[in-house]
Image (cartoon, rainbow, N blue to C red):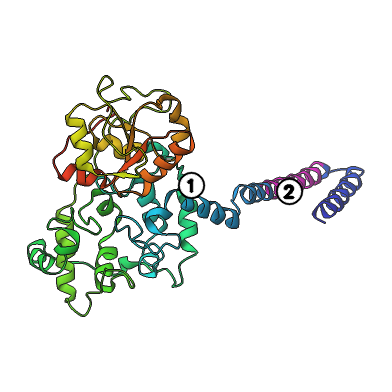
Amino acid sequence: MFRRVMVAMLAGLSGCASCSGSSTGGAGSSDAGAASVVDAAASASVAARHAAADAAAKADAAPDPVAVVARGKMLYGRYCYFCHGTEGLGYTADEAPALASDDLLALASDDFLRDAIVKGRPGTTMSSWSVARGGPLAYTDASAIVAYLRTWQKRPSESPDTRSVKGTAERGAATYATHCATCHGAKGSGAKYNALANPELLASATDGFLATTIERGRAGTPMVAFKEKLSTEAIDDVVALLRSWQKPPDELPELPPKPGALSSVILNPKGPQPVFEPKADFIPADTVKRELDRKATMIIVDARPPSDYARMHIAGAISVPFYLVGEFAKQIPKDRYILTYCGCPHAESVKVRDALRGLGYTRVAVIDEGMLVWRDRGYAMRGGAKP
């Protein structure tokens, strides 16, 4: 339609120019006026075409929301469910929190949720999953998982930052010790539930988010609401205390070798065979330590993502993330007893054990209590990229 109008306009203008050209005087003025109108119309036509092309390009580039959610569901089923539960109800492994919680999802921004996936909570069992930190997930993958989590949300999103928070850390210390330390640790770490002093958490969470979460709790979880137990001032003081613990996140250490580049795979290569039950699914940590002390030969496999390994691992262990077992298997001999571990203490290590058994390894078991118990018992640990 636009093109037909333009053709008619141009045809009419050409006719006017011909008529005026046959008369004397004023012909140049008429020609210039006609040309000016034609140029303006042509420019408008080009701009309109460009705008339409830009809109089409943006529409083509925009991902299909249904496909994004489907991908997020698939990735959640690959990397998240074994700790947070198939339906996101949490506490499946190592007290991982519920994600299908309106008290979380209504307050948490997409950026907050995505950061938790991409950066993790270093020093806890919540791994860093991004490619940049040695994990398997691109930024768009993390966004897809967030989109899937949103399908569990029933309550409208709200901004907790409309709540003003003004507290004093000194007053907050006593309140925290009475109401929070049992679950979250005396200094916000090392206890059963969320590490509140974690640098990545505090870097992502706003004061309003923290205060509102304390007020409302998380229904259906161990996190109770404190609105009826604590005054607004007391809650603000607890938030101020948490802020006093905030430190910059640690720099990412050197990551362990990728598939094909493993070294020092076997511990005590010339030592005796360990005295383990050949068909055992789990071996106690103390039994493993006893065999290491007598220089028994074995392979110990850390099943967690690489950044977790780089920060802390059992001395002598190699890094074989649970999602890359097939790629690493070529460098793992089948003539040694293999022990796997994680921090959960079984979620990821069992996956490695079962994957290796599926590849024909006959003597594979899990260190039963996991890495954190190994550490707490004072057994040898180290950080860095090497075993």
Query: Is residue 281 shown to the viewer in this render?
Result: yes
Q: State how far apart marks 1 and 2 are (Cα).
A: 40 Å
Residue at x 20%, y 46% (from the top left corner): 373
Q: How many labels, in total?
A: 2
Q: Residue flagged by tag 1: what amino acid is it?
A: Asp
The residue stretch that appears in magenta: 28-50
- Res 352 → quadrant: top left
Residue at x 21%, y 67% (from the top left corner): 165
Q: Earlier in the sequence, mark 1 or mark 2?
A: 2
Q: Residue furthest bottom?
A: 228
Please say if 145 is above or below 89: above
Secondary structure beneath label 2: helix
Q: Is residue 237 left or right of residue 386?
A: left
Please say if 116 is above or below 229: above
Residue marked by disc 2 = 45
Residue marked by disc 1 = 141
Instruction: Tell which tag, 1 or 2, sits nearer the viewer.
Output: 1
The rendered magenta stretch, by its main secondary structure, is classed as helix
The image shows residue 302 at horizontal and vertical percentages of: 32, 37
Q: Is residue 107 left or right of residue 312?
A: right
Query: Is residue 381 shown to the viewer in this render?
Result: no
Q: Residue flagged by tag 2: what amino acid is it?
A: Ser
Secondary structure beneath label 1: helix
Residue at x 36%, y 61% (from the top left corner): 90
The stretch drawn in magenta includes residue 46: yes
> Which one is in front, 38 or 161?
161
The image shows residue 369 at horizontal and vertical percentages of: 25, 48
The reply to whether the C-beta atoms of the residues labelled 1 and 2 are less than 8 Å apart is no
